[in-house]
Image (cartoon, rainbow, N blue to C red):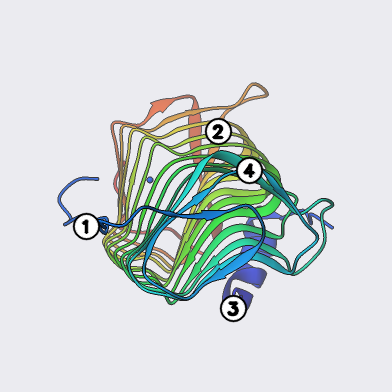
Amino acid sequence: MARSRWVAPVLAVAVVAAFVFVFGVPTPATPAFDDPPTRLDSCSVIRDSGRYVLTDDIDERAESCVRITADDVVLDGNGHVIDGHTFRENTTGIAVTGRNVTVRDLTAVNWTFGVRYEGARGGTVTNVTTWHTGDGVTVSDSPESRVGRVTATNGFTGIFVRDSDGSVVSNGVVRDMSSVGLFVADSRDVTVNNASVVRSKTGIALLGDRNGRATDAVVRSTDEALLLVDSRNNEIRNATLSNPDGAAVVARSNESDNRLVGTRGNWTSDGASGTTHKNRA
């Protein structure tokens, strides 16, 4: 995954440790199908449009357990778990490259990437839980995606959105991340609603973003509650920031015209490099 553009800024500003989210935007339609769903009980490649449902938990040491290459797919986990057995590098629980793909109602455990969309426009991830997984849900080069009701615990990054203009992240709950709870990079017009991040190195990071909006976020017990780097004209509204050991930190570097409106809690703003200008709180 091409994240190298942000390795140096995050290390310098956030001192990242290693690990070794819908309003005002049209919502993609979930595909409708007349045929009964195809039943899955093992790792599979989905090459045809349609509905698929997990009928059992899957515990396999696969590089990618479920790969979805077709457009117009609904994968219903039916509450089951996809488990990589033990954590290993460069593994993916569910890998999506098709357009208009919905993944819902499942848990991914012990993967480098729990659910990963790559070049997959208009996808939807909902009611997904990840645990002991490097990056819980990743949306990369996938515009107009929807990530809702994701719970990510014990990993590196909880929810990561990159190069995915017009995407929406809502009702995400992220806990115990060694890097970033919710990370949005190199994207325009991304909306984040009702995010909760607790005990992460950085709570919410906006790096290289334009015209985004985050509302009603709650961030607690982080080194940096908010991190703004190379970002312009974003609005963070009604955030609640707190830290049991002192003021929560809003860290800023090379960014302008970002607005913090109605921010609650004990917090302070820290310009990490150079002078912060034209920002309004």
- Asked whether 151 or 191 is in front, the reply is 151
Cα distance between the residues tagged 2 and 1: 39 Å
Which label sits in the foreground, 3 or 2?
A: 3
Spatial CA span between label 3 and label 2: 30 Å
- Disc nearest the viewer among 2 and 1: 1
Q: Are the residues flagged by discs 2 and 4 in contact, CB closer than 8 Å?
A: no
Label 1 belongs to which residue? Answer: 29
At a point 68% along the width and 24% down the height, the residue shown is 245
Q: Where is residue 41 in the image (x, y as percent from the top left)?
A: 63, 52
Location of the C terminus (image quadrant): top left
Helix, strand or loop at mark 2: strand
Question: Eyeballing the image, is 29 above or below 197?
Answer: below
* Residue topped by disc 3: 2
Residue count near mark 4 (Cα–Cα under 10 Å), binned few <14, some 14–19, many ≥20: some
**Badge 3: residue crowd in 10 Å (few <14, some 14–19, many ≥20):** few
Q: Reading the chain from its start, which is encountered first: label 4 or label 3?
A: 3
Residue bearing mark 2: 248
Foreground label between 4 and 3: 4
